Amino acid sequence: MKSYDLKIVADENIPAVEQMFARFGDITRVDGRSLDPEQLVDVDVLLVRSVTQVNQQLLANSPVKFVGSATIGTDHVDKKYLSSRHIQFASAPGCNADAVVEYDLSCIMQLLQQSNESLADKVVAIVGVGNVGSRLARRLQAVGVKQLILNDPPRAQHESGFSDLNSVLETADIIALHTPLIKGGPWPTEHLLGSAELALLKPGAILLNAGRGPAIKGTDLLEFLHNRDDVRTVLDVWEHEPAVDSALAAMVNIATPHIAGYSLEGKLRGTYMLKQALTSFLQLEGDESLQDFLPDPAISSVQLTDQADALAVINLLYDPYRDDRALRATLQSPNQQREFDLLRKNYPIRREFCSLSIDGPISDSNKEKFLRLGFSAQ
């Protein structure tokens, strides 16, 4: 496999594949959710997202030698099978972590502003402290919260500073779930939160899940919200997606179609990481950077004064209620699952905070607050 004449199959929703992979061979785009073995009978490279189950059933009769998943999670990939077939695997851990962090911050600040609350007065818990959770922790520490508590049982086996789940749920004003989907073993995360756990939430708590849908048992959450309308919820992931429980969505404060990580930077970074991995696998030289593939942002700079409101600046780049409205408009459709996928496929361009540079007659202390949120400076 040292030639550039490879046959590449790529999910139709992975961006910039043609720009980044054209040097390696011919590219065919496919619907990743309906990909079948017949489409891979003469394929060398397979590039997928989380909607494709990559396993023996898919690859048994395929000559695929490299599988890349432009995702943080890998629970959709049978890595043991790939290893047994000597198929090289690469994923994109952390590719869209900053985008998910900024989604969290946007949603939390929206809900707090509505009730005239301040993040500085809140105890915030992060459940699952991996690529996303650890970055969210750093960003929250930088902007300032009353207290930050962390829950991650695998890490707690070897590190200090972690709390058990029940104490987290009882103590925190805001809980952000960022766990992988683990169905077995000593620390399963499937249905991590059910009726018993939800009952521990404080009055007025905010529960946000932008990790994996099955981490919360949907039927239990629906029943809980019917009885506890004081608890505010943000769901970007759903237990049975692309199917979304319309009754549950109606009870949720912010409901979005699994797009927390869908910044342009995050998407292109995922593709770029796979490009780097394939370049290394083929023992080729690579001389392009991610910046070579990023267009100029629509809004590149903004002039601020000391009266600038952080959420107003965030809204220049992202307003989660846009995605909330888009999802709710599909919930009564007979083609709801298809429309869920289309919302993701046709997602509008969203830039990360770092794409926006701040300047103007603003004090150094206030400017520093915006820099800690993730914006850049001229």
Image (cartoon, grey):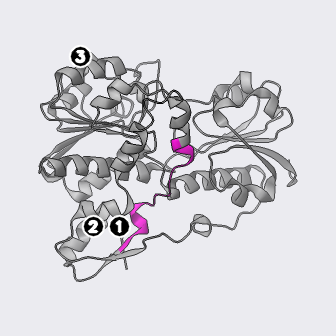
Q: Position of residue 163 (x, y in %)?
A: 24, 32
The stretch drawn in magenta includes residue 352:
yes
Residue range corresponding to the magenta coloring: 343-357
Residue at horizontal 52%, vertical 43%? 344
Question: Residue 297's x, y, as percent?
Answer: 48, 69
Q: Amino acid at mark 3?
A: Ala
Residue depicted at 26% across the width and 18% down the height: 223
Q: Residue furthest front?
A: 333
Quick one: label 1 or label 2, which is nearer the N terminus? 2
Q: CA distance from mark 1 to mark 3?
A: 40 Å
In the image, which disc is placed on residue 375? 1
Indicate the amino acid at tag 1.
Answer: Phe
The answer, for residue 197, to whether it is visible in the render is: yes
Indicate the quadrant where residue 252 lies: top left
In the rendered structure, find residue 117 and report the number of the disc placed on it: none
Residue 50 appears left or right of 279: left
Q: Secondary structure at mark 1?
A: loop
Tell me the residue at 48%/26% (across/down).
243
Dot 1, how many residues are within 10 Å of its Cα: few (below 14), some (14-19), or many (20+)?
many
Q: Which residue is mark 3?
A: 196
| Residue 217: in magenta span | no
Residue 370: which numbered mark, if any?
A: 2
